[in-house]
Amino acid sequence: MILAGVDAGATTTRAVAVADDGRVVGRASAGPGNPHNAGVKEAAAAIARAVREAAGGPIPDLVVAGVAGIEDPAIKEGLRAALVTMHAAGKIHLASDAEIALDGAFLGAPGIIVVAGTGSVSWGRDARGNEARAGGWGHILDDAGSGYDVGRAALGAVLREHDGRGGATALTHRVLSALHLAGPEQIVGAARGMTPAQMAGLAPLVMDAAELGDTMAEAIVREAGRHLAEMAAAVWRGLRFAGAHPGAGIGGLFRHAVLRSAFAGGLRRACPEAVPTPPRLQPAGGALWRAFAVKGIEPPPGLIDALRGE
Amino acid sequence: MILAGVDAGATTTRAVAVADDGRVVGRASAGPGNPHNAGVKEAAAAIARAVREAAGGPIPDLVVAGVAGIEDPAIKEGLRAALVTMHAAGKIHLASDAEIALDGAFLGAPGIIVVAGTGSVSWGRDARGNEARAGGWGHILDDAGSGYDVGRAALGAVLREHDGRGGATALTHRVLSALHLAGPEQIVGAARGMTPAQMAGLAPLVMDAAELGDTMAEAIVREAGRHLAEMAAAVWRGLRFAGAHPGAGIGGLFRHAVLRSAFAGGLRRACPEAVPTPPRLQPAGGALWRAFAVKGIEPPPGLIDALRGE
């Protein structure tokens, strides 16, 4: 029997397939699998492609896929129907992207995660299985502290410097050359055609500038860290956590030192009892962990080590 | 000879037509005339409709229309071609929405305006005709302090209260009932289909809540006022103004006392020499004033009084 776990992200879809004895069959990635950005059909195609490559031939018995915005019944059913049509798996279980990230981070134990990739969300679970969430309302209204948010703020900082509203920033040179633009006036036109994932693609450039001491970039990154800590704190309060509980930051933004430090600082102030803890598994591994739970099979010994980094 | 001035807004397009002796021929309004939001063809149709109704039969010899984002040559030429096809006028002169607002505010004299309607922008002109601008980069990246910005912040505040991230706010009840939603979870779906003008349509509700002392609403409105003052200050510095110069707030948001006071406070701090001055004419009147200038005719005595409120 083959099980597969999928993390369907706004930029990249990752899949990992294992046999029920714990042997890793394969790993694969595909393009955007977020139905809100990519559309339901394209998201399903990316998921099916990643699963097929990871499984390397046989159709998995069960696929657990973590997908953003799956709370919307129309999206959930549309995605499920498309995946069934594509014969992606014998059985398909759709979960939210935050749930599989939480499953992977603490393997079912209580705790809180904050995801910061193209979008952002915080999710937590207590010992009785109660869950709470904050953020993750999409890039138009929220996604505070996300890569999209950081990228948009960078474009804003360039325009504000150009206007004389904000201070000078190294972001101007970096953003213009990354987007191949001759001047700030071209930013609005360029931004009009950008997907959320493309906007979030500017975040690493902001992180770099912050690390090199650019004041404006640092302010953007520090504010993002604060927003992410605020989300975690809301979930902490929502679950009425008391005593030490683990908290993990997941997603591309947490690779950057300035953001990690701003997040950790904000968390220390808001939830002094939170214990910063690296996630046991990344979200695709969490989806696979959940696949074993759905099947009612104890994950084989060694599986967690084999999946580390997934 | 008939001249017409048009203010093509994101929500409403206003036109006023006068004879060259200063007699007001008529006024009319139509739907959205902002080509960025409504599309070039629909914007042209709204402008042509408003002009036709205002002129009441004869085709005006000259129409001056103030349009947002007219700096984009593709939009400018597309709009001009569509208006020519529609026989909207003998001659068509397209200006930016901010320019006609400035023309109307001070009738060509030096000064600074801040426009806050669906979008926001500041624009100024010195005695030598040098111009400077700040803001107005569109709702995705900027439009700080605009109606769109205020409406989006209100939706964000409702979601943050729902998450336990932000404090309690009367905006929740107001926003949900205005949008006919059962709960905050439905906000993301509702926002997805909203035009910038519809988002800005929530601003009056925020202003009302602020006036009644709602802390979250007040914070949103005060921040909007600060952003608008910051734009004006950037233009002030850009033009190297020294000594007293007039500054006018134009657009729907300035009808509200809390915003006016936050803007005035911010401006006092940043530009103590700016003299808050009500605009002589509203933007459509400014477009007409410019029509006389384009024709090289001195505006007839009494015209300004006849156009007051335009």
Image: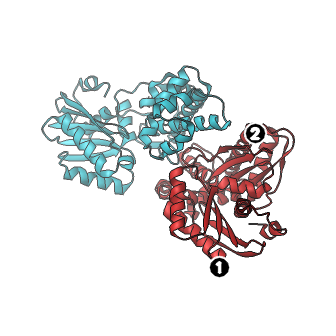
Chain colours: A red, B cyan
Helix or strand or loop: what does disc 1 sit on? loop
- Residue at which label 1 appears: A56
- Residue at which label 2 appears: A239
Using the image, name the chain to which the residue with label 2 belongs: A
Q: Amino acid at mark 2?
A: Leu
Dividing the picture into quarters, in which one does residue B198 lie?
A: top left
Can residue B123 be seen in this snapshot?
no
Quarter the N terminus of chain B occupies:
top left
Q: Amino acid at mark 1?
A: Gly
Taking B81 as reference, is A227 left or right?
right
| Relative depth, front residue between A79 and A263 | A79
Above or below — where is A185 with respect to A14? above
| Relative depth, front residue between A200 and B104 | A200
Q: Residues within 10 Å of mark 2 (few under 14, many from 20)?
A: some
Helix or strand or loop: what does disc 2 sit on? loop
| Relative depth, front residue between B225 and A241 | A241
Check the image and name the residue furthest to the right: A243
- Give the distance between the C-alpha atoms of the residues marked 1 and 2, in whole angstroms: 41 Å
| Relative depth, front residue between A136 and A221 | A136
x, y percent for residue A200: 60, 57
Residue at figure coordinates x 64%, y 28% from the top left = B168
Residue at figure coordinates x 85%, y 41% from the top left = A273
Taking A97 as reference, is B89 left or right?
left
